[in-house]
Image (tube, grey):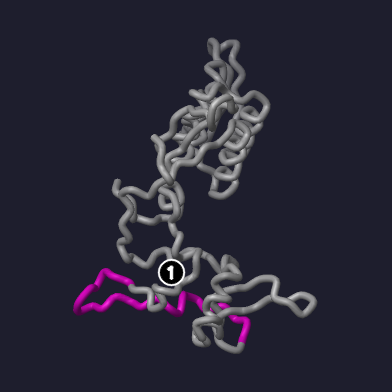
Amino acid sequence: MEGKDDIFLSMEEAISAIRMDFCQYPPQTDLFVDLSPLILGPHIRVVNESRYNGLWISTAGCKHTRKRRKITAVELGWLLIDTLAASPPPPELMTEICRLTFLVPAEPSGNGAGSEAGVRLQMGAEGFRCRHCGRCCRELNYRNELIPDDYNRWQALGRADILERVATITRGGRIVSYAIWVEPGTRRFLETCPWLMAPDPKSRPDRFVCSIHDVKPEICQQYPGTRKHARMTGCPGFDR
């Protein structure tokens, strides 16, 4: 499973990546429940019971001896991370945990002869096709994701029309960050991306178009990046 889109994670890096995933998105209740037996072990049972209003965690055993308590999805997420950090599982089990978490093919692997064990993830974007639905442009917040390379590129191209919609944040007379997209001459954010062209009802009623597609910001070029991020942000671009 070698390829340019493969990445190797040591056990410590895998745990860090899982922690970042848990923090990046709203609590992933179904994922946390699926991961619980892998991470917490067979002596701990977690169920999501809608009739009892949420998650419950209990120790295994007969009904007279097991202890049962309610737990929030956030609390369960942190319990899983803390357990992983305190007692990392074998590479084979960590591989399954990563596969479920990141929604990509994975296999246990070393990073070269004699190196520590870890997990190799196949992060390619096979099966992705932009549907031109415009959802990412209309619904996601990338206001503070502009990088200096984008700004410098637009300067080199003389794209004053783009630059006038960028707010620069300065400190000590130098630019330290950027924000997009604003009304020209102000710091008031526009409600929607000014470069998104609505579908033509006559020719392509379902196709949004980016009017600066060839020079759009890197954050837009890279979206959605992974199958997991696409799912979590509502992008329909990956084959189901």
Picture layout, residue 226 above or below residue 30? below
Whether the magenta-drawn stretch holds residue 49 is answered as: no
Q: Position of residue 84 (x, y in %)?
A: 61, 29
Q: Looking at the picture, which amino acid does disc 1 mark? A: Arg
Q: Position of residue 179 (x, y in %)?
A: 60, 73
Q: Main secondary structure of the magenta part?
A: loop
In what quadrant of the picture does the N terminus appear? top left
Nearest to the observer: residue 228 or residue 112: 112
For the point 62% across and 79% down, the residue is 167
Picture layout, residue 236 above or below residue 159? above
Secondary structure of the residue carrying numbered label 1: helix
Picture layout, residue 13 above or below residue 233? above
Residue at the outermost right position: 172
Residue at the outermost bottom position: 185
Picture layout, residue 71 above or below residue 200? above
Horizontally, is 170 left or right of 158 in the view?
A: right
Residue at the outermost front position: 113
Whether the magenta-drawn stretch holds residue 203 is answered as: yes
Nearest to the observer: residue 89 or residue 11: 11
For the point 57% across and 43% down, the residue is 22
Identify the image quadrant of residue 188.
bottom right
**Extent of the magenta region:** 186-208
Identify the image quadrant of residue 129.
bottom left
Q: Position of residue 200 (x, y in %)?
A: 26, 78
Nearest to the observer: residue 76 or residue 129: 129
| Residue assigned mark 1 | 138
For the point 61% across and 86% down, the residue is 186
Horizontally, is 202 left or right of 98 in the view?
A: left
Q: Label 1 neighbourhood size at 10 Å, few (<14), some (14-19), many (20+)?
A: few
Identify the image quadrant of residue 189.
bottom right
Please count the marks in the image: 1
